[in-house]
Image (tube, rainbow, N blue to C red):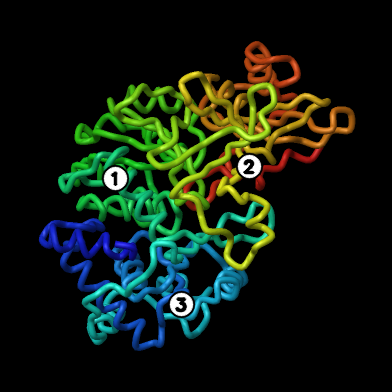
Amino acid sequence: MPNLAELLSRAAAQHAGRIALKLDEQELNYAFLDEGASRIAGLLGERGIEPGDRVALMLPNVPYFPVIYYGILRAGGVVVPMNVLLKRREVDFYLSDSGAKLLFVWHGFAAEAPDDAISVKPGEFEQLVIAAAGVPENAERAGDDTAVILYTSGTTGTPKGAELTHDSLRTNCEVTAQTLAQLTPDDVILGALPLFHSFGQTCGLNAAISGGACLSMIPRFDPVKALEIIQRDRVTVFEGVPTMYHAILNVPNREDYDVSSLRLCISGGSAMPVEVMRGFEEAFDCKVLEGYGLSETSPVASFNHPDRDRKPGSIGTPIEGVEMRLAEEEKGVGEIAIRGHNVMKGYWNKPDATADVLDSDGWFYTGDMATVDEDGYFFIVDRKKDMIIRGGYNVYPREIEEVLYEHPAVSEAAVVGVPDDAMGEEVGAAVVLKAEAGADDIRTFVKDRVAAYKYPRVIWFLDDLPKGPTGKILKREIKPPAE
């Protein structure tokens, strides 16, 4: 079944009456979701959309997102998911770069969209969909046809669109659903990750549909709301980025919520501090499995598997059908290279950028630096470009952050390079406190635990660290205080 939309068609045939999506009191069963996608495909046909045409989607985590997503796929279109926080200039770039012929936009963000975008407003949008004729069959697509163009965050320049195929996305979500999360139709997944992001799309939405499970959605993450939904809906699987775990762990009355239904927690998006993982597991009596991936890898590449030894601090071993190795290894540290079903076709209309990261043998070079132990478990050291070179010595921020999180007064921390005339770069740390502490105390704490050239000489305190839509800490926005 090459077309990714077959995930929904198959689930609707097998689980028609089961609840596929929840948003508070709103529930959609599989039959209703499938019918909605069918009519969206019909609407697209009426608008002149043909197989291979790009259609953009700018919605938060509401049930309309999956309906439109699978409708675009059913019509044979290519989905271009967009962050709902984009401003008009950015929206125009995404639409022009992808060549999208149509944009569905949530009514609350319509001011940032072109006038010809289809506004998704509850009540009005339903009328538009009902008026369209359904399309009973999925458009035929080849397995290596592009299904989704996911734009990278653009930390190294303008965003690039990773072309992900029907085969790569389907295989990645099925491996996630079957071998990692081991989903069944009785499972309820907390849909807190943005669906426009690769993690939420593959491991949340597509994996849930693949397994016939239920996705209970949160339009905007809030730790108290998350605990309420886990208790109310008897959530069995929680997927989040480390800052979500940190936020839930720090809810003052967290013990008041019944979270006994949780059987599995999955973390990705960025490295989870070991102290946060241990604290969460102790508080909620639920194992956390950490994984790793990128938009360019659909996204899952490696995981701590539920049926194998787990190593806290490790991103685990490659998933089924995927190879990983260290390239240009030096003193045990090298750049992660990935090859397998999950790797993108390339960056949309950017052959030079594609050639920079994808070689002729199919290896994708991630820019992430790691070590690998004797059991084949990978450990992220840091982003290649985030590495700090202090006086000729390499300092990997991830290592220093782990130590900072062990300090009893530190709530969150991010280590960045600070320009320095003498050393080239100095090690700096932006810290959020949860108890009173001074810079000297924290500096001494780290100095006692790492090599002399590694500890942060420059420490400053913030009320909050800047974060992206998935909760990932945005290091590029962290600036040291002016002297």
Q: Which residue is mark 2?
A: 367
Query: Which residue type does callout 2 highlight?
Result: Gly
Task: Describe residue 12's horizontal placement relative to residue 427 as left or right.
Answer: left
Q: Foreground residue, 343 or 127?
A: 343
**Quadrant location, the N terminus:** bottom left
The quadrant in which the C terminus is found is top right
Q: Circles 2 and 1: CB distance less than 8 Å?
A: no
* Front-most of residues 254 and 48: 48
Viewer-proximal residue, 356 or 281? 356
Mark 1 and mark 3 residues within 8 Å of each other at the beta carbon: no
CA–CA distance in space, label 2 to label 1: 27 Å
Foreground residue, 362 or 129?
A: 362
**Picture layout, residue 225 above or below residue 246:** below
* Element type where label 2 sits in the image: strand
* Residue 481 is at least partly visible in this image: yes
Q: For the residue carrying disc 3, how many other residues have a C-alpha within 10 Å: few (<14), some (14-19), or many (20+)?
A: some
In percent of width and height, residue 281 lies at 34, 25
Q: Amino acid at mark 3?
A: Asp
Identify residue for label 3: 53
Which of the two labelled residues, at mark 1 and mark 3, occupies the earlier sequence position?
3
Q: Which residue is mark 1?
A: 177
Per the model, the C-alpha gap separating discs 3 and 2 is 31 Å
